[in-house]
Image (cartoon, rainbow, N blue to C red):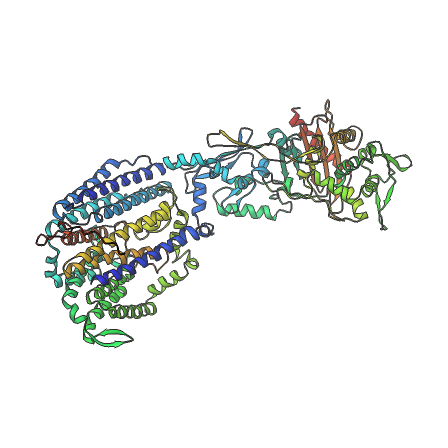
């Protein structure tokens, strides 16, 4: 009988091996798939079971977790939700997370590797892990000034500290309330989300960093930079500035927004052309410099490159191979040139920072659950866009725009402000877009701003009329005026 | 000669310490703090284990030293997980402003104490397992009676569709667990007597010797009873367990592989019949083949079980940090998924290894046993463990269709705990007998033998 027992024990051993293999399949091989299945509440419950770290603006927790006493232990609360929505994003049961809530998830939920030491302690003590805190680069005063300024309009504002690339403000209008997308009532979340989705103004779009608009005349800053970089032009170089510019190989004419010549005898200096935003002079200049030079210059400012701040910004575009008439249109920020507010703020920040384009960033520090600093973001340079001497020269030209040209509404008493207006058609009949980009103080800028207002009405003055006051308010907020 | 009782004691202390640590971890990680009755409960566990050890030390001196600690450790794991689920249930009730349910862990601990008493009773009263052989048919009859008891009016109770409970007042019991032991004794006693005739071969088909037609009686009866359990009590697990047990023992007793084939075909036939006739069997199979389609209805349990296991991963969520209470019947049928979620595949492997050790030790006892009855009984009892673990663990992990069987020693429930501890006592009794040095002969191990060095071949 012993032999039969041995044989049977071999069979049972095989059955146990089958159990072990099957359990390995479930717990190791396919575990990831099971964890991510839609019906699996565990991942969600685990997320909501631990205290998620706050998102801080200076020391103010603009997003934080509060205990509820429900099955989902913690609820995400946003003080000033719509104001900071483009930064924080939301943290939703139904729609997942966006913004810093998404990109910094592993910090906020305490699972990032930098918490390894804490985790060992948690393992020993058996405590639930607590998330770390994320301190943003946002300047609350600048953010609020931009938000106030945008009220009743549709658009976005981005402010950058030129020397570092720190993003001081990132504001959109219309915005949304992340509290309503992050509550624990799926039906309410869906209702609100559908409402937002149906809104033609697209409040869920992160306008400051993903909304692409033709930069219009603000792109002339890039063209002027390319002109100085070529060595063939200075601020005083004389350019042709006639009433109309005949597009090469085309019957179409390009006209100045004033409908007049840009200077006596249709001649104008580069400085003056920028100050009065002379289209014909810049169209001509664009073709003189050539598409390649314009593209190189724009790419040194960050065009055709996707930035992660760490939110993923849309790639601002300069077209690949424009022909001569397309180059002329591109030189005045039309045709296929597209830019985000972030990109145009970067252009101005670079000009103000002696031509050094810095990588923009939104996360200043990562802190542990006890708020000790674990990691600090160091500024890093993206590219050299201008020689320092050229940046000085361009800065002077841009100060002239504010003091004597189209950007008078951005003047701040006692501070030299550099700026440029812009208006662009987004299509043949499409509503136009008003821009104002600036930095201040001109000599050693503390802030560079880009304001974009969509559907503004078709006049060039709108850049100065609508956008410049907002830029001014943001600059004043940063400068403490 | 060393009888290894001290090894047993050390292993028991180790199991007890693991129990304290596990309980503390549950308390701390769930935020309950140090469990309020920690010292009373751990002292109770220590007392039960110590008494069992002392009884083994004096009444089954030569018994296997591993089985008692393994059984104790498994029971302790069960107690920890039941306590952990109590905490979860209490918390849920608190959140819903419902009255906090009575904790299960104390009643399980009480059942452990009763099981310990019965364990000691078996070892003290039953000095020689061969005495059981005398009552072969009494046990058989009692076993059958217990099997059908849940069908009796008044006391029989149907829980979750399966009629396998009896209830008298507030006291409920699953008689099939006890019937399992009685019928194993019956099978062993019956087969040891009839094995010679059952092993007779009349014809050979495809190289397999077939038994005489008139000897087919017992297996057909066992088969019919198993089907009866399935039909009238809707208890797939018990039905499978009995038939598998009987066929295995028949094979061991007769040493004829043909019984395995016959058993297998009868099983196939029965399975097909059950599948085509009974809705509840069909439903189980459908869910087994594709649980995901029925994730919100009939497949909910198994899908939640798989989610729990997946959540556990390699090292587990940690005791008190998973969500094992999301699986229905987490403390009974699905206690393995609860343990797998919080202890990970590491924990499951460890637990399956413990079962493997227990079964291997039991089968070894069977092999070394000197009488046929003891051999069959030890093998049969070990096989009940093996089959039960395979069917339930395979069931909750989706390897085989889900059937309602308890997980030996781990699951919440008195009948099951008592039955498994009685089985362990019987195995230790047989083990004591078979390992006892035979004083009539001089063992070659103990005798001074001349050492003959091996010659090198040139």
Q: Position of residue B102 (x, y in %)?
A: 27, 43
Q: Nearer the viewer, residue A7 or B441?
A: B441
Q: Is residue B404 left or right of residue A44?
A: left
Q: Is residue B8 left or right of residue A337?
A: left
Q: Quadrant of residue A439?
A: top right
Is A268 on the left-hand or right-hand side of A191? right
The residue that appears at 25% across and 41% down in the rendered structure is: B14
Q: What residue is rendered at 79% in x and 47% in y? A: A326
Marker count (numbered): 0
**Residue lying farthest front?**
B458
- Residue B152 appears in view: no
Q: Is residue A297 visible?
A: yes
Which of the two residues, B62 or B192, is positioned nearer the viewer here?
Answer: B62
Spot the residue most to the left: B440
Image quadrant where residue A468 sits:
top right
Q: Quadrant of the C terminus of chain B?
A: bottom left
Residue B353 percent location from the top left of the image: 30, 50
Q: Residue furthest right?
A: A265
Position in image of residue B177 (x %, y %): 22, 56
Q: Position of residue A23 (x, y in %)?
A: 37, 53
């Amino acid at each position: 009988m012993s032999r039969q027992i041995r044989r049977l024990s071999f069979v049972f051993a095989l059955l146990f091996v089958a159990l072990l293999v099957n359990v390995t399949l479930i717990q190791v091989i396919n575990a990831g798939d099971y964890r991510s299945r839609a019906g699996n509440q565990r991942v969600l419950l685990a997320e909501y079971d631990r205290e998620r770290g706050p998102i801080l603006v200076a020391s103010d927790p603009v997003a934080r977790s509060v205990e509820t006493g429900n099955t989902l232990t913690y609820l995400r609360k946003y003080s000033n939700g719509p104001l900071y929505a483009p930064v924080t994003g939301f943290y939703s049961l139904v729609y997942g997370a966006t913004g810093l809530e998404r990109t910094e998830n592993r910090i906020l939920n305490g699972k990032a590797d930098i918490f390894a030491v804490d985790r060992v302690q948690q393992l020993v003590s058996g405590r639930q892990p607590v998330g770390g805190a994320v301190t943003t680069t946002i300047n609350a005063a600048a953010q609020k000034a931009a938000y106030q300024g945008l009220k009743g309009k549709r658009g976005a504002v981005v402010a950058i500290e030129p020397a570092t690339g720190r993003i001081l403000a990132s504001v959109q209008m219309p915005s949304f309330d992340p509290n309503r997308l992050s509550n624990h009532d799926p039906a309410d979340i869906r209702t609100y989300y559908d409402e937002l989705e149906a809104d033609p103004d697209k409040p869920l779009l992160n306008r400051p960093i993903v909304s692409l608009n033709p930069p219009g005349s603000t792109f002339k800053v890039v063209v002027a930079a390319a002109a100085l970089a070529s060595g063939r032009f200075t601020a005083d170089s004389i350019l042709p500035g006639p009433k109309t510019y005949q597009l090469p190989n085309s019957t179409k004419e390009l006209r100045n927004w004033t409908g007049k010549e840009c200077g006596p005898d249709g001649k104008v200096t580069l400085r003056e052309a920028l100050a009065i935003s002379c289209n014909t002079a810049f169209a001509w200049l664009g073709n003189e410099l050539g598409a390649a030079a314009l593209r190189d210059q724009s790419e040194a400012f960050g065009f055709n490159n996707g930035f992660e701040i760490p939110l993923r910004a849309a790639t601002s575009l300069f077209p690949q191979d424009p022909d001569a008439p397309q180059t002329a249109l591109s030189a005045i920020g039309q045709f296929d040139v597209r830019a985000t507010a972030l990109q145009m703020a970067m252009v101005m920040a670079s000009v103000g920072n002696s031509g050094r384009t810095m990588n923009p960033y939104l996360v200043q520090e990562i802190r542990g659950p006890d708020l000790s600093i674990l990691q600090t973001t160091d500024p890093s340079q993206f590219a050299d866009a201008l020689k320092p001497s050229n940046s000085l020269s361009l800065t002077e030209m841009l100060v002239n725009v504010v003091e004597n040209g189209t950007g008078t509404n951005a003047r701040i008493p006692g501070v030299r402000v550099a700026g440029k207006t812009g208006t662009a058609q987004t299509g043949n009949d499409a509503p136009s877009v008003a821009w104002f980009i600036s930095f201040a103080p001109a000599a050693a800028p503390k802030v560079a701003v880009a304001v974009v207002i969509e559907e503004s009405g078709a006049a060039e003055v709108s850049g100065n009329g609508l956008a410049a006051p907002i830029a001014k308010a943001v600059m004043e907020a940063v400068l403490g005026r | 000669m060393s009888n290894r009782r001290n090894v047993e004691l050390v292993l028991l202390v180790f199991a007890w310490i693991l129990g304290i640590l596990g309980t503390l971890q549950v308390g701390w990680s769930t935020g309950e703090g140090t469990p309020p009755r920690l010292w009373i409960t751990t002292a109770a566990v220590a007392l039960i284990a110590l008494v069992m050890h002392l009884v083994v030390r004096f009444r089954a001196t030569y018994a296997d030293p591993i089985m008692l600690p393994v059984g104790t450790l498994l029971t302790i794991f069960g107690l920890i997980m039941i306590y952990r689920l109590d905490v979860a249930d209490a918390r849920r009730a608190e959140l819903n402003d419902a009255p906090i349910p009575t904790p299960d862990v104390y009643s399980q601990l009480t059942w452990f104490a009763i099981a310990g008493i019965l364990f000691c009773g078996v070892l003290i009263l039953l000095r020689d397992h061969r005495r059981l052989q005398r009552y072969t048919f009494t046990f058989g009859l009692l076993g059958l009676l217990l099997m059908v008891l849940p069908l009796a009016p008044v006391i029989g109770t149907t829980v979750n569709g399966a009629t396998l409970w009896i209830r008298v007042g507030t006291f409920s019991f699953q008689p099939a667990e006890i019937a399992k032991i009685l019928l194993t004794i019956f099978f062993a006693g019956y087969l040891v007597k009839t094995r010679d005739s059952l092993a007779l071969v009349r014809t050979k088909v495809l190289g397999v010797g077939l038994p005489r037609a008139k000897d087919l009686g017992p297996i057909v009866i066992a088969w019919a009873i198993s089907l009866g359990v399935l039909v009238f009590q809707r208890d797939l697990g018990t039905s499978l367990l009995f038939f598998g047990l009987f066929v295995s023992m028949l094979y061991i007793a007769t040493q004829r592989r043909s019984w395995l084939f016959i058993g297998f075909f009868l099983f196939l036939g029965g399975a097909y019949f059950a599948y085509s006739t009974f809705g509840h069997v069909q439903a189980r199979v459908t869910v087994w083949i594709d649980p995901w389609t029925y994730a919100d209805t009939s497949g909910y349990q198994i899908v939640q079980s798989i989610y729990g296991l997946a959540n556990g991963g390699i090292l587990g969520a940690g005791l008190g940090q998973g969500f094992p209470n999301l699986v229905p019947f987490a403390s009974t049928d699905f206690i393995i998924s609860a343990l797998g979620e919080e202890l990970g595949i590491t924990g499951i492997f460890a637990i399956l290894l413990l079962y493997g050790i227990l079964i291997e030790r039991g089968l070894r006892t069977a092999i070394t046993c000197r009488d046929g009855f003891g051999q069959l009984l030890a093998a049969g009892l070990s096989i009940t463990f093996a089959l039960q673990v395979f069917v339930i663990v395979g069931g909750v992990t989706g390897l085989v269709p889900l059937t309602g069987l308890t997980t030996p020693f781990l699951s919440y429930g008195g009948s099951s705990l008592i039955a498994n501890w009685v089985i362990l006592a019987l195995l230790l009794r047989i083990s004591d007998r078979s390992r006892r040095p035979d004083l009539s002969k001089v063992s070659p191990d103990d005798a001074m033998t001349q050492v003959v060095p091996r010659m090198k071949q040139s």
